[in-house]
Image (spheres, rainbow, N blue to C red):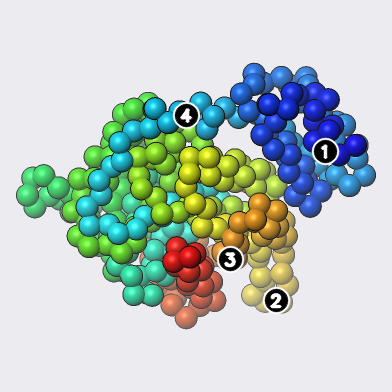
């Protein structure tokens, strides 16, 4: 009896979104069904009892299936921007914003006029990473904001409009409205490629952004950890159902290399994101190590790609940037 046949013992075929085997880690995704913890537990127990299975998970999702074509909003007009890609993650804490900023700088180093927009409205970190925290945006004509421009990259963030310790207690409609206003009412000039730092997860804001912006593709950031990859798969499935191309997966915090002895420690697992990319038949863009230089330079407002252009970390970001450009062209 195969995995899908076992799943069919507990849930009807029309409710089974997918049954994936990621090197012995089974993820069953169900749609259009009320969560039934008892049945899900029994299914997990039966799957986990199989010799070839290391771990089994059951995911209930309605997020993308409740979105109809008739509810799709009008596309936002972002003047001067030729191509837009989203930098996304299934969950927070995987280094998505750090990856977005360093990739923007790497793309700029490759000769592209680059911008980064901070749409992570509840946890904006771009102002800190690009060194304009505490600086209020200005408007020269009273109509459009002027973007910040540091290290050759233009940027805008809701974080520049609020104090660092002020929480945004906004529901989806107000949050989406703020993102739209800042994104469409900023004087971007001529931009070859804009990176949008998306909020983590697959909620209302992510769906609205995905339907309202003409994305040329999405880059998914994940650690090799199982719990992060489960959520990353959710994000990939959401974007694909909405009709946005997945440019590839980046494995962040891939490993730690001891500077004294050279020992490699796979703290969050080994090549989990790469294996997931292979299973989903998506591009694997590259891996970024866990290193104090990346963290310290991000916190100091001097991203490692700018601060240490000859480092191995910078070379890794630049190779991922080249892979992104290649996938965009293809």
* Residue closest to the eye, 53 or 65: 65
Reading the image, the residue beneath label 4 is 67
**Cβ–Cβ under 8 Å for marks 4 and 2:** no
Reading the image, the residue beneath label 3 is 286
Reading the image, the residue beneath label 2 is 262
Which residue is drawn at the image coordinates 69% and 38% (left, top)? 18
**Residue 122 shows in this picture:** no
| Residue 293 image point, x, y percent | 51, 68
- Of the image marks 2 and 1, the number of the one nearer the N terminus: 1
Marks 4 and 1, how far apart at CA:
29 Å
Disc 3: CA contacts within 10 A as few (<14), some (14-19) or many (>=20): some
| Residue 269 image point, x, y percent | 72, 56
Q: Quadrant of residue 312?
A: bottom right
Depth-wise, is mark 1 or mark 3 nearer the camera?
1
- Of the image marks 4 and 1, the number of the one nearer the N terminus: 1
- Of the image marks 4 and 3, the number of the one nearer the N terminus: 4
Depth-wise, is mark 4 or mark 2 nearer the camera?
4
Marks 2 and 1, how far apart at CA:
41 Å
Disc 4: CA contacts within 10 A as few (<14), some (14-19) or many (>=20): some
Element type where label 3 sits in the image: strand
């Amino acid at each position: 009896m195969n995995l899908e046949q076992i799943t069919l013992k507990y849930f009807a075929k029309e409710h089974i979104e997918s049954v994936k085997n990621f090197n012995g880690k089974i993820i069953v995704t169900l749609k259009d069904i009320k969560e039934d913890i008892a049945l899900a537990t029994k299914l997990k127990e039966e799957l986990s009892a199989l010799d070839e299975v290391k771990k089994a998970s059951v995911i209930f999702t309605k997020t993308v299936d409740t979105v109809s074509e008739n509810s799709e909003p009008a596309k936002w007009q972002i003047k001067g921007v030729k191509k837009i890609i989203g930098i996304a993650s299934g969950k927070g804490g995987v280094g998505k914003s750090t990856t977005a900023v360093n990739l923007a700088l790497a793309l700029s180093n490759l000769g592209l006029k680059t911008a980064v927009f901070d749409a992570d409205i509840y946890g904006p970190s771009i102002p800190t990473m690009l060194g304009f925290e505490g600086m209020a945006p200005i408007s020269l004509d009273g109509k459009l904001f002027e973007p910040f421009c540091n290290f050759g990259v233009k940027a805008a963030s809701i974080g520049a409009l609020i104090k660092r310790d002020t929480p945004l207690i906004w529901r989806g409609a107000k949050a989406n409205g703020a993102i739209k206003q800042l994104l469409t009412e900023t004087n971007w000039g001529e931009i070859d490629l804009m990176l949008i730092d998306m909020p983590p997860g697959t909620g209302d804001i992510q769906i609205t952004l995905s339907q309202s912006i003409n994305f040329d593709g999405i880059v998914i950031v994940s650690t090799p950890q199982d719990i992060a990859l489960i959520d990353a798969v959710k994000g990939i499935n959401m974007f694909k159902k909405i009709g946005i191309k997945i440019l590839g997966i980046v494995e962040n915090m891939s490993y730690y290399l001891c500077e004294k002895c050279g020992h490699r420690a796979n703290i969050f697992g080994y090549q989990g994101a790469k294996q997931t990319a292979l299973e989903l038949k998506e591009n694997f863009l590259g891996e970024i190590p866990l290193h104090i230089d990346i963290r310290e330079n991000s916190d100091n407002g001097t991203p490692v790609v700018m601060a240490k252009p000859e480092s191995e970390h910078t070379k890794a970001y630049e190779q991922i940037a080249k892979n992104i450009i290649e996938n965009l062209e293809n």
